[in-house]
Image: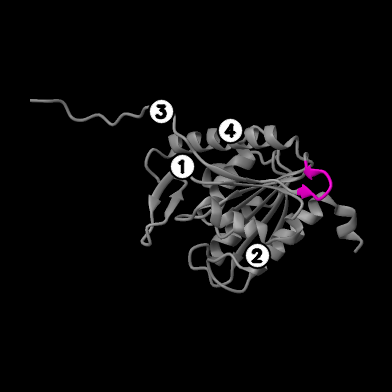
Amino acid sequence: MSTSPRDLAIVTPIHGRYLLRVPESPDLGPIRNAPMAVGFHGYGESAEAHLERLEAIPELANWTLVSIQGLHRFYDRSRQVVASWMTSQDREDAIEDNLRYVRSVVTEAIHHTGEPQALVYIGYSQGVAMAWRAAVLGARRVDGLAVFGGDVPPELHVRPLTQCPAVLIGRGRDDAYYTADKFKADLDMLAGRFVVVEPYEVVGGHAWSSDVGTEVGGFVARLVNPTAAANP
């Protein structure tokens, strides 16, 4: 006879990867202390995919860009290496691991580039939940959070949102995943939570488009220069 198998968890070091793009001045070279945007990609994507989205936003041209890749890598059908942030298995442990990981990335990126004038997290699809968690539960207060195509993680519904004062939250009108009902539920939950929420919808489904980039660009521009945004 033998005992029933036990399901145990163990902490182990693991290497992650992120992409860092630093803006440059023609005369002075790399710019230190530039505003920083930290990106969180969707399921089955890479850090490169999300960095391309951020680089396509004109308002982020002079920002330091950080694109973090999920820790759980796998091959897609075309044999490209992509990643996922987590699954439902050992959910709480995975959240803790990811928060520690993001904290390390942001700390190291700031060490390389200097204290940023502003810090914004930008998430898409599965990366939305991770961006929310990092913004609300992370070690640093962020200036803004821009998310598209994903709902607010349930564990944050009762958490103070003081570390994240401004949120841009959007969906595609035909998105079958982040539905209109889920969108409304998130907006209702965020109402009265002492956070400035800017909701928007774009034409299309569950896909990042140039319209999304335009919304994100306007949001970050207002964060760093609210007077100019109010008086064009």
Dot 4 alpha-carbon crowd within 10 angstroms: few under 14, some 14 to 19, many 20 or more: few
Name the kind of residue labelled 2 in the image: Val
User: Where 219 sits versus 165, above or below?
Assistant: below
Q: Secondary structure at mark 4?
A: helix
Of 15 and 180, which appears nearest the observer?
A: 15
Assign the N terminus to one quadrant of the image: top left
First in sequence: mark 3 vs mark 2: 3
Left or right: 78 as drawn, with respect to 107:
left
Tags 1 and 2 touching, CB below 8 Å: no
Which is more foreground, mark 2 or mark 4? Answer: 4
Amino acid carrying mark 3 in the image: Thr
Res. 219 visible in picture: yes
Q: Which residue is mark 1?
A: 71
Q: Which label lies toward us, 3 or 2? A: 3
**Label 4 belongs to which residue?**
104
Give the quadrant of residue 147: bottom right
The residue furthest front is 27
Q: Earlier in the sequence, mark 1 or mark 4?
A: 1
Among numbered discs 3 and 1, the one appearing first in the sequence:
3
Q: Based on the picture, tell me whether residue 104 belongs to the magenta stretch.
A: no
Q: Is residue 56 above or below residue 72?
A: below
- Residue 116 location, x and y as percent? 76, 39
Where residue 183 appears, as percent x and y from the top left, is: 58, 61
Residue 151 in the figure: left or right of residue 213: left
The mark found on residue 212 in the picture is 2
Task: Estimate the spatial distance between the alpha carbons at disc 2 and disc 4, rounded to whole Å.
Answer: 28 Å
Q: Is residue 32 left or right of residue 11?
A: right
Q: Quadrant of residue 102?
A: top right
Q: Residue at x 58, y 42 (%)?
A: 133
Tell me which colouring the rendered structure shows: one colour
